[in-house]
Amino acid sequence: MFYLFHGPDTYRQREALAAELAKLGDADMLSLNTTRLASRVSFAELQGACDAMPFLAPARVVIVQDLFVTVPDKAFMDKLEAYLPALPLTTRLFFLEAQALTDSHRIIRLAAKQKIGEVRQFQPLKDNDLDRWIQARAADKGGRIAPQAAHLLAEHVGGGNLQALSNEIEKLTLYRGPGATIEAADVQLLSPDAAEASIFPLMDAIGGRQAVAAAKLFQEKLNEGAEPFLLFSMIIRQFRLLIQTRALLDGGERPAGVAAQLHVPIFVADKLVRQARGYSLSQLEHIYRRLLEIDVEAKTGRADLLTALHLLVAGLTVEQ
C-alpha cells in the first residue's frame, strides 16, 4: 500500500507517519527495514527499495521526501503509475510532500480510482481548529488549558509552526503541574511571543510620547497582577529588541529581514520596526543604559523599583 501526505503542515505529516509506523510492530526491527529516499531518486532505485522483502518484520517501509516537488519527467510518472497497483503487499510506501498537490495530480487520481492508496492533505490549522489542537495537545501532555489561553497561544504563535506551539504547551504544562489548568496569565508570563504582544500597547504609547496613555496602560499591567520585576524585564527586553531593530534598519534591512535575524514572527517584527522608527539609535542606547542603572539600583536597595518604573515611563514619554 502507498500513502501520499502532502501540504505545508509537515509537523502533522510527521505525526501521521509515526502513527502508521507504530502499527507495524517493533520499532527497532522496523528501522532495519526502512529506506529513506531523496527527491531526485531514479525509478529503478525506488522500485528496488519497494521490491525488497522485509527481514524479521511484517513490512518493508520506503519513505520518499518531496519527490513530486521536482516534477519527475513523464517517463518516470508513467512507470510509477503502472507500478503502484503491483506494489508488494509487504511494502508500505510513503510519499511526503511539503507542498500541496492539486486534485488532478496523477497519483492522487490513481489512488481515488483504484482504491490502492491513502491521500491526506495537511494545511496549517487556524481559528477553532487550531484552538482545539492546542487543547488536545495539552491533554496529551497531562494538563489542561483554558480556552482564552489556547486562543492567546494560537494568535501569537500561529498554526504555521506546530513544533513551537508544542514546545510552549509542554513548558506551560510543566510549569502548572499535572492536571492543572493553564491560564492566559501563564501564557503571557512564559511564552515570549505572547509576552511581547501584551506589552506592545504600552510600548506604542511610550514610543508615541503619549504620557497619559502610557501611565494608564502601565497601571493596568500592575492592576492585572504583573510583578514589577517581570514588567521591568519585559521593558528591558523590548528596548534591547528595539536597539537591534534600529541598527538593522540603519543597515538597510526590511521587516522580513528583521524577523529572520531576530528570530521573531513577522507580526512582531512589523511592530518593532514601527516602534524603532520613532527613535534614533543613540536615543535607544541612552534609554537602555538608564534601564541598566535602574536594575542595579533596585537590586542594591538604592531605589524602589516600582517608583523607578513610574518615573521611567513618565520620562520616556517626554520628547528625547
Image (cartoon, grey):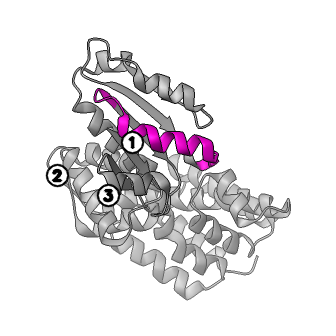
Of marks 1 and 3, which one's residue comes earlier in the chain? 1
Answer yes or no: is residue 79 visible.
yes
Magenta range is 69-91
Distance from Cα at disc 1 to Cα at disc 3: 29 Å
| Residue depth check, mark 1 versus mark 3: number of the one nearer the observer | 1
Evaluate if marks 1 and 2 touch, with contact meaning CB atoms under 8 Å apart: no
Residue 295 versus residue 22 in the image, above or below: below
Give the amino acid at mark 3: Asp
Q: Position of residue 92 (x, y in %)?
A: 34, 33
At a point 55% along the width and 25% down the height, the residue shown is: 45
At a point 69% along the width and 51% down the height, the residue shown is: 261
Residue 203 versus residue 234 in the image, above or below: below
Q: Position of residue 23 (x, y in %)?
A: 21, 32
Q: Position of residue 51 (x, y in %)?
A: 41, 23
Image position of 226 (left or right of 19): right
**Numbered disc 3: secondary structure:** helix
The disc placed on residue 14 is 1
The residue pinned by badge 2 equals: 180
Distance from Cα at disc 3 to Cα at disc 2: 12 Å
Answer yes or no: is residue 290 visible.
no
Give the amino acid at mark 2: Ala
Q: Residues within 10 Å of mark 3 (few under 14, many from 20)?
A: some
Furthest-top residue in view?
A: 56
Of marks 3 and 2, which one's residue comes earlier in the chain? 2
Which residue is at the front of the view, 142 or 57? 57
Provide the major secondary structure of the magenta segment: helix
Distance from Cα at disc 1 to Cα at disc 2: 29 Å
Which quarter of the rendering shows the C terminus? bottom right
The disc placed on residue 240 is none
